[in-house]
Amino acid sequence: MSLEAIRDQAVPVRLLQTMLRRNRLPNGLLFWGPDGVGKRLTAIALAQAINCAERPDAGCGACLPCRRVVKGNHPDVRLVTPVRKARIIDVEAIETVNELAALRPYESSWRVFVIDEADRMYPAAQNHFLKTLEEPPGQSLFILVTQHPRILLPTIRSRCQRIRFGGLAPATVAELLQNQRDLPRQTAQAIAAISQGQISRALDLVDTDKRDIALSIVEKLDHGDEPIVVAEDFVKHLEAQRKQIEAQHARENDEEDEQEATAEDKKARQERQKAVVDTMIRRDIMEYLHILQTWYRDVLVFDATGEEDRVMNRDRLVALESAQANGATEKLEALDRARLYLDRFINEERVFRDLFFALAAK
Ligand SMILES: [Zn+2]
């Protein structure tokens, strides 16, 4: 893919093209911004441009070097990604990077390393990497890609030129969604609006039942179901989800146990796995709350303007039309409160019980 074909990231692309044209690439670049907006794609496109035989300022995407970069078999371009379900970049992976970086490029004038989800490097790996980044062997370019730059050591951050990526336009997300999934236009538009310009998040909403579950809560509460029962069901659903994620990770542990591991290793691994599961569940919960927020926001907007184009859940206009706008502001406030309480680790079931009582109010 050519740099020019990257969607909705005009500022980063222009910056990179200027660097290319002036031959002023730094040794470290940090691409940061939300997940699913094209950071990694841009890093690969930059690696193509550096190696391209036809269009060195943008990459053509079609010549042999360009194709080899995408296929992952260009000798001077290396993509490092987290491995295993625990999704870590370990010291070993970084050692390989360090060794390769010390060698001259084979074909190109640069060696390019794309480190995806760079925040998955644990501090030990980061420290290992730091030495190479501090004294980069001549022509090495390290592109660190992350949505959580703050997790990286400040010493790493400060040695990279930071380039910020924003969300994609909703129309772009809707178009990409329709290219990848068989969806009615209205649904694609609704999900694009809810996913805040992140294609990965939009795909998750299409492929999971999160949105149906969130909106069915609204439906049940509007129908007069007991908030306490709805909260119990929802917490049960979350527990089942947690068990599922844990089971996947347990399988991963078995795999690793086949190799010899000390008791300390195992303990550290268990703690790490728990943190990973907690983070995943937390992200899911926040997504449910976000979907609920889009709903009550839409209720207010539709009530005030009556304009379909302004609502996010535009595939649910019938339900929106009959929704009661009275009290929607208070419901949005209750959702903000729930977020706050969950951040303070107040018991989930209690938080949802209180929340659903507030959402059930007429
Ligand atoms: Zn090319």
Image: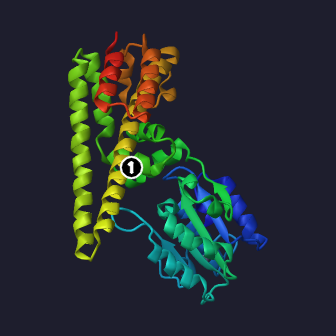
Quadrant containing ligand 1: bottom right
Left or right of 90 in this view: 148:
right
Residue 56 in percent (x, y) is at 68, 75
**In this view of the protein, which residue sits in the foreground, 302 or 145?**
145
**In this view of the protein, which residue sits in the foreground, 180 or 286?**
286
* Disc 1 within 8 angstroms of ligand 1 (CB): no
**In this view of the protein, which residue sits in the foreground, 303 or 167?**
167
Relative to 318, residue 24 above or below: below
Colour pattern: rainbow
Tell me if mark 1 has few (under 14), some (14-19) or many (20+) residues whose alpha carbon lies within 10 angstroms of its own. Answer: many
> What residue is disc 1 on?
203
The answer to whether one can see residue 159 in this image is: yes
Residue 362 in percent (x, y) is at 34, 9
Amino acid type, callout 1: Leu
Left or right of 139 in this view: 64:
left
Q: Secondary structure at mark 1?
A: helix
Q: Quadrant of residue 103?
A: bottom right
The answer to whether one can see residue 60 in this image is: no
Quadrant placement of the N terminus: bottom right
Residue 126 in percent (x, y) is at 54, 67
**In this view of the protein, which residue sits in the foreground, 121 or 139?**
121
Residue 186 in percent (x, y) is at 40, 36
Relative to 39, residue 22 above or below: below
- Name the residue rendered at 53%, 53% in the picture: 147
